[in-house]
């Protein structure tokens, strides 16, 4: 019933740091299962479409430039309450305030370069998964 799918993206900063495996290990250890995955380098159009909800935010241009700066690892995670669980393991948007032991606390750098994306709701998860898969 509460088994869900969510979209996770290991962002260009974390891919460049060579920590895809370390991050995946945390997700798997928590009980989430990777059911599909691919590495892509996004175009500006793709990144802008994916983050369309943020197009009026002050950080939009910085976010898009960051997200197209290198390859990303895109994956579908499956598990019990996967959307909420994934967000908990990720930690807060700002790595400097994210709880210790979270992915963003350990691998993020700042509010933009924060290592990982995770869908924030059932509706976002459906949209984001269908955007890439
Ligand atoms: O990713 P999350 O859902 O935690 O945060 P968001 O508010 O949906 O923002 C999406 C992404 O925009 C963040 O993960 C950051 O990469 C970026 N961002 C930023 O560059 N500067 C901010 N002040 C806030 C977010
Ligand atoms: Mg978000």
Image (tube, helix red, strand yellow):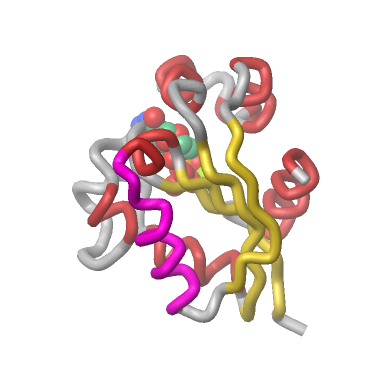
Specify the segment rendered in magenta. Answer: 17-29
Provide residue 66's location: percent of width, then percent of height. Answer: 42, 24
Q: Quadrant of residue 46?
A: top right
In front of the other: 61 or 33: 33
Is 27 contained in the magenta span?
Answer: yes
Residue ID at (35%, 36%): 16
Provide residue 100's location: percent of width, then percent of height. Answer: 21, 65
In front of the other: 83 or 57: 83
Residue ID at (62%, 19%): 43
In front of the other: 93 or 90: 90
Is 49 contained in the magenta span?
Answer: no
Provide residue 67's location: percent of width, then percent of height. Answer: 48, 27
Q: Is residue 71 left or right of residue 110?
A: right
Q: Quadrant of residue 83?
A: bottom right
Above or below 108: residue 50: above
Q: Quadrant of residue 12?
A: top left
Residue ID at (78%, 46%): 133
Q: Quadrant of ligand 1?
A: top left
Secondary structure, magenta segment, majority class: helix
Provide residue 4's location: percent of width, then percent of height. Answer: 70, 71
Residue ID at (41%, 19%): 62
Above or below 105: residue 39: above
- The quarter of the rendered structure image containing the N terminus is bottom right
Q: Is residue 29 left or right of residue 129?
A: left
Q: Is residue 32 left or right of residue 98?
A: right
């Amino acid at each position: 019933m509460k088994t869900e799918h969510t979209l996770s993206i290991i962002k260009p900063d974390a891919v460049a740091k060579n920590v895809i495996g370390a991050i995946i290990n945390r997700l798997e250890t928590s009980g989430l299962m990777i059911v599909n995955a691919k590495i892509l380098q996004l175009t500006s159009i793709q990144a802008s479409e994916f983050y369309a909800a943020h197009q009026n935010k002050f950080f939009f241009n910085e976010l898009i430039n960051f997200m197209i700066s290198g390859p990303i690892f895109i994956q579908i995670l499956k598990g019990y309450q996967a959307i909420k669980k994934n967000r908990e393991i990720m930690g807060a948007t700002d790595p400097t305030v994210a709880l210790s032991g979270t992915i963003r606390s350990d691998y993020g750098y700042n509010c933009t370069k924060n290592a990982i994306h995770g869908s924030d709701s059932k509706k976002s998860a459906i949209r984001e998964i269908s955007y890439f898969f």
